[in-house]
Amino acid sequence: MKYMLLINSAVTESDAEPASFEEWVAYDKSVRESGVYVAGESLADLTTATTVRVNASGERTVTDGPFAETREILGGFYVIDVPDLDVALDWAARCPGARGGGSVVVRPVAEFD
């Protein structure tokens, strides 16, 4: 079953040290070499984001950035193919993004025929 791991970085100060670049490289290598990797990307800086909203009449509004009132921002994702949720949760727990005040949201990927 495919799961998406949504990696959220903490925006606020945290007592925990964020993961190092080397930890991210090691995690990425382990995901790819394990055979569970389907897709994954790191997102560009939040300041490059653009938000689109469409109202009921079909008119669109485009604004710079998400500027949501949140303490976490989506920093990247992995899609993995594993037997079940427990295995997906194990991969999420190993992710460097789950430490340092961040989190990893695990969601099944819906498959439509």
Image: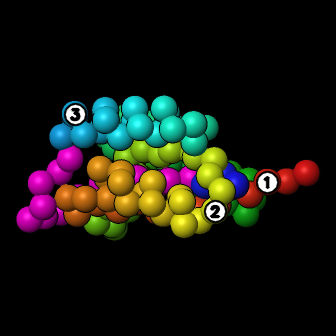
Viewer-nearest of discs 1 and 2 = 2
Which residue ends up furthest to the right in the rendered image? 113
Disc 1 residue type (three-letter) = Glu
Amino acid, disc 3: Glu
- The percent position of residue 83, horizontal first and vertical second, equals 66, 56
Write down the region rendered in magenta: 4-19
Tag 1 residue: 111
Q: Is residue 108 above or below residue 79?
A: below
Residue at the image point whose x is 91% and y is 51% from the top? 113
Instruction: Answer yes or no: is residue 96 visible.
Output: yes
Q: Residue at x 40, y 32 (%)?
A: 29
Q: Which mark is residue 22?
A: 3
Q: Residue at x 32, y 59 (%)?
A: 98
Mark carried by residue 70:
none
Mark 3 vs 2: CB contact within 8 A: no
Mark closest to the chain's N terminus, 3 or 2 = 3
**For the residue labelled by badge 1, is the local secondary structure a helix, a strand or a loop?**
loop
Q: Secondary structure at mark 3?
A: helix
Residue 4 is situated, as x and y percent measured from the top left of the image, at 56, 53
